[in-house]
Amino acid sequence: MGESAPVAKPRFKRILLKLSGEALMGPGGFGIDPPTLEGIASEIAEVRALGVELAVVIGGGNIFRGLAASAHGMDRASADYMGMMATLMNSLALQDALERINVITRVLSAIEVKELAEPYIRRRAMRHLEKGRVVIFAAGTGNPYFTTDTAASLRAMEIHAEVLMKATKVDGVYDKDPHKHTDAVLFKRLTYIDVLQRNLKVMDSTAISLCRDNKLAIIVFDLGTRGNIRRVVQGESIGTLVTDEENRPW
């Protein structure tokens, strides 16, 4: 029997993975699709098995969108708090899926829900990561008017993540929506300034500015292709890299 190919060493030691709530819907239009959730959990388990310290931020758009609700007359702060509760529900669902495949996790919430999750304390989060636990950050920043993209950027910097990996439904950042325009062009590399000046839909401007000010690289990639999380972690040039000219992870 031939020897199996050696497994590539991870390029990064500590990462933050940003998932949209919609990523959990699968083919449905709402809520959580169990097979999709299990698939994401198994990919996270693969990456953790490589020795990578991994934290996750999940949006809540599959359950409730605060911005959309406020556009229909609901108070923005109230709507955003409801959205934070949706992210907590998604975080607990991912925790359950991971622990069913023997991946130890901790959910840390920016809003105190002591019966369900630990309160967010930066040093506690760091310690969990050092012990090999997957840390799931719930409830955004704990403040209205801030998106989960901004929460992901903030948490990534607080835990000293080497890269922020944003999983999407497309294979990177395009100059326009590739689902609507057949001539859309994929960017392999962008600077933070490019993203802000072109108003590209990578993350909101607050999140991009935070990453720029702290030189945190962002990799935008397709979650729909099995194994892509591992490929990015192992340094394959997948998706779009957003950074400055001097700070390149590979």
Image: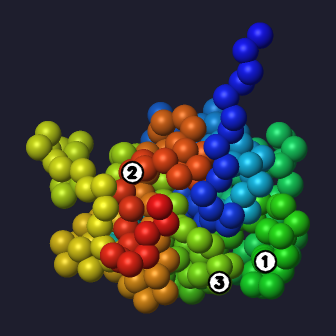
Q: Amino acid at mark 1?
A: Met
Regarding mark 2 in the picture, which secondary structure is present there?
A: loop
Q: CA distance from mark 3 to mark 1?
A: 9 Å
Q: Residue at x 52, y 61 (%)?
A: 165
Q: Residue at x 74, y 49 (%)?
A: 50
Q: Where is 128 relative to 177, above or below?
A: below
Among all residues in the image, which is located at the extreme front?
2
Q: Residue 221 shows which numbered tag?
A: none
Q: Name which quarter of the figure residue 106 lies in.
A: bottom right
Q: Could you tell me how many numbered marks the image carries?
A: 3
Regarding mark 1 in the picture, which secondary structure is present there?
A: helix
Q: Which residue position is annotated with label 2?
A: 239
Residue 155 horizontal side relative to residue 75, left or right: right
Q: Which residue position is annotated with label 1?
A: 126
Q: Residues within 10 Å of mark 3 (few under 14, many from 20)?
A: few
Q: Position of residue 215 (x, y in %)?
A: 46, 82
Q: Name which quarter of the figure residue 158 lies in.
A: bottom right
Among all residues in the image, which is located at the extreme bottom?
213
Closer to the camera in the image, 27 or 81? 27
Q: Residue at x 40, y 83 (%)?
A: 212
Q: Residues within 10 Å of mark 2 (few under 14, many from 20)?
A: many
Q: Residues within 10 Å of mark 1 (few under 14, many from 20)?
A: some
Q: Position of residue 89 (x, y in %)?
A: 68, 59
Q: Position of residue 169 (x, y in %)?
A: 40, 46
Q: Which residue position is annotated with label 3?
A: 158
Q: Where is 103 relative to 138, above or below?
A: above
Q: CA distance from mark 2 to mark 3?
A: 25 Å
Q: Position of residue 222 (x, y in %)?
A: 43, 46
Dot 1 or dot 2, earlier in sequence: 1
Q: Amino acid at mark 3?
A: Glu
Closer to the camera in the image, 68 or 52? 52
Q: Where is 131 relative to 6, above or below?
A: below
